[in-house]
Amino acid sequence: MRYGLIMLLILIVPAMGQSNYIPPVIEGENYWNMYGSPNLTAAISGTNEFDKGDTVTLYIDLINYGRFLSFEKDKTAYTPMEMALAAKEQELEQAKTTAIGIVATLVSESEQIEVKSGDQVVESLKSGDKTRNPLKFTVKIAKHAPAGVYPLKLNLEYDYQYNVQVDANKFDPATNNLVGFRAAYWYQKANQTVIVPIVVKKKADFMITGVKGVLHAGAKKDELQVTYKNIGEEGVSDAIARLSIFKPFSSTDDQAYIGDLGPGEEATVVFRLDVDSDATPKEYGINSEIKYTDVRGDTVISESMKIPVSVEPASGSMMLPAIAVLVVLGGAGAYIYRRRSGKT
């Protein structure tokens, strides 16, 4: 379903007899009953396959395959004027398969796909024609959307000519023209629904399923255990988890090797972080990503994932040595002071 014009499934839902609207009535005649209507379908221009997390523009061409189904006489023409009127009515009835004032609305029924664009309008579309410029809809795919086909509904509402009545003041045989010709047009509303399928491609995808470890202000090489899970549809190889470090954190060990990770598999890695002594005790978020080789041999970097980290005040075990050092230094200072005082 990649590239070119992609024809789409169409479900026709006519609104026959529901919303006819009529202009001021003339005292005309109806010589023909013509049966038929527009029939709209659609084609995606370009690819309909996209990646998880993409925001894309979907280009859709409308095509009118409307046709006449049958016709029958409603009144027989006898006189030259009636024959001319009947011929003129038959000519005007040819517009019956033209869709007028098309309003196109793209709708998603999946939480994984969001349509960001509003309605698109096409002035008219004759039978056998396609839109001069494609309709443009912006579509956002969820970051972790499962791979597969997502059918979108393209709802189409339009008007079309339902019937024509004709009249004239007289017929001029010398010029073969109808003098004072006039016509009345009946229009009808209709709607159709076209199914527009888009495809979310298979790929590896990751999420953090577990974090262990508490960091302390002033700590050196505190351990942080992070568990990553491949929630995508493809496996990876040579995977490496990487951190994006910022103050109050620093590290010489901000990468961890994962290796192979198949769909549904988890791996736990350990990072060692230093924390500034003046770090504010609170909850932080450290960004991480996974660099890997996909099944096609390409090097890929995953979407960023935030690791929740708690920083607590310096632990008591760290404070005691510091206090002991201060006590020793204080005692040594007092001893030296006493010795100097005695000599004096």
Image: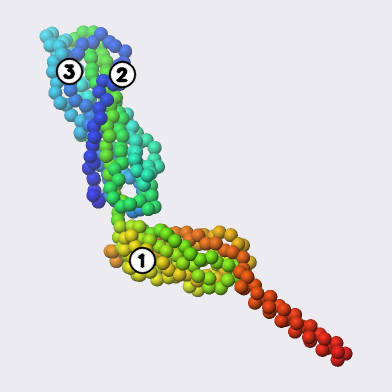
Q: Which residue is drawn at 37% across and 68% down?
A: 239
Spot occupied by residue 2 in the image (x, y as percentages of width and height): 25, 51
Q: Work out whether 259 lies above or below 185.
A: below
The quadrant in which residue 39 appears is top left
- Mark 1 highlights which residue? 292
For the question of whether residue 122 can be seen, the reply is no
The colour scheme used to paint the residues is rainbow
Along the viewing direction, whichever of 133 and 275 lies nearer the viewer: 275
As helix, strand or loop, the secondary structure at mark 1 comes to strand
Discs 1/2, front? 1
Q: Which residue is drawn at 61% across and 73% down?
A: 317
Is 338 positioned to the left or the right of 281 in the image?
right
- Mark 2 highlights which residue? 21
Quadrant in which the C terminus is drawn:
bottom right
Q: Residues within 10 Å of mark 2 (few under 14, many from 20)?
A: few
Q: What residue type is labelled 3?
A: Asn
Q: What residue type is labelled 1?
A: Tyr
Distance between mark 2 and mark 3 Cα atoms: 18 Å
Q: Work out whether 113 lies above or below 220.
A: above
